[in-house]
Image (tube, helix red, strand yellow):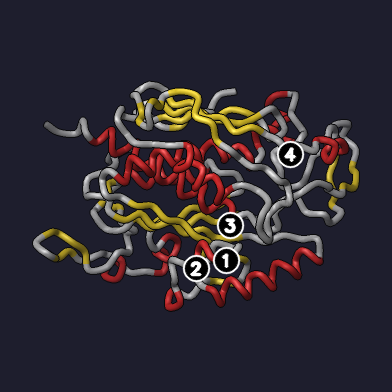
Amino acid sequence: MAGSIFGKVLTMTTWGESHGAGIGVVVDGCPAGLSISEEYIQDMLDRRKPGGRDFATPRQEADLVKILSGVFEGKTTGTPISMMIENTSQRSGDYGNLATTYRPGHADYGFDAKYGFRDYRGGGRSSGRETAGRVAAGAIAAKLLEEYGISVSAYVSAIGTVVCDPKRFDPEEIRRNALCMPDAEAAERASLYLRKLMEDQDSSGSEVTCVVKGVPAGIGEPVFDKLDARLGQAIFSIGAVKAVEIGDGTDVVKSRGSENNDGFCIKDGKVSKKTNHSGGILGGISDGSDILIRASFKPTPSIFKEQDTVNASGEEVKLSIRGRHDPVIGPRASVVVEAMTAFTIADLLLINRCSKL
């Protein structure tokens, strides 16, 4: 299978399946001497792992990371960093009826058409569980960015029609509620909405916003490796993402040039901008402002309602999905967006060190 490697100088290679022995990632290109520990990586993984909170699949996985190589006495050695997370709560029997039946909204049919074979236990490589390796890799990237004074933070900004109010934004609230929303009132309304959907055996779409602070001007390449293009690839590679926006995003369609252009000014002796409609990126290169990204996740396709589908024999059938599934993807995926964003910027930051003498 091609396409399991991301990055150019700093690379990650994820491996494993949802119901295999384990999943993991190999990170290569990380400079030697970076302080890193399993505890630091675990903190990010705990934000993604299943079970333990409302609106997450009841599948209980400890998601304990083991660093197998590339770290000695608490510091990276410059060699490939291999990390593994064992699967301990597989219930493959929940998927027995899917061996020859294609789930609506899933990759089953496309996988069969491409390979002529698929691991139907939870989706195999197409499972959201693959993202645990990405989060472990993203933790290393986030630690590297800390050395440059760069921070990355993602949160759920909307669930269904419930949208966070910027006036009530509280960064501390993101860790306090089960939905990772920075607006306590919106989180409460979204909780009621999700409970009703669960009663109806249905699911909801969601939006994740990611903010990157401290990125200096000049990161990103001007043609195919534009910063926004690389971020788009990184975020779109996360399962269930159907749209990615930078800055004002699709609202630029309704804007005029005189409104959308960010005027430059001098602030504290440095070039700055009066507004940030660009989302921190101009011409594919960072402009020194906060980088603003939004990712739209489709509703969880695994719902318990009976659905119309077909099987591998070409027969139209009815399907009722069993198993353990999230009613909304955004809360657990927000840290995945954070991880992929951090990894992308860290990779381009290392590439940028070759841009001039």
- x, y percentage for residue 173? 49, 68
Q: Quadrant of residue 262?
A: bottom left
- x, y percentage for residue 71? 40, 27
- Tell me the kind of residue under disc 2: Glu
- Tell me the kind of residue under disc 3: Pro
- Contact between marks 2 and 1 (CB within 8 A): the answer is yes
In the picture of the structure, the residue carrying the numbered disc 3 is: 331
Query: How far is mark 2 from mark 1, CA to CA?
Result: 6 Å
In the picture of the structure, the residue carrying the numbered disc 4 is: 89
- x, y percentage for residue 270? 12, 59
Tell me which label, 1 or 4, sits earlier in the chain: 4
Q: Secondary structure at mark 4?
A: loop
Q: Secondary structure at mark 2?
A: helix
Quick check: can you spot residue 112? yes
Query: How far is mark 3 from mark 2, CA to CA?
Result: 13 Å
- Tell me the kind of residue under disc 1: Asn
Query: How far is mark 4 from mark 3, CA to CA?
Result: 21 Å
- Tell me the kind of residue under disc 4: Ser
Q: Secondary structure at mark 3?
A: helix
In the picture of the structure, the residue carrying the numbered disc 2 is: 173
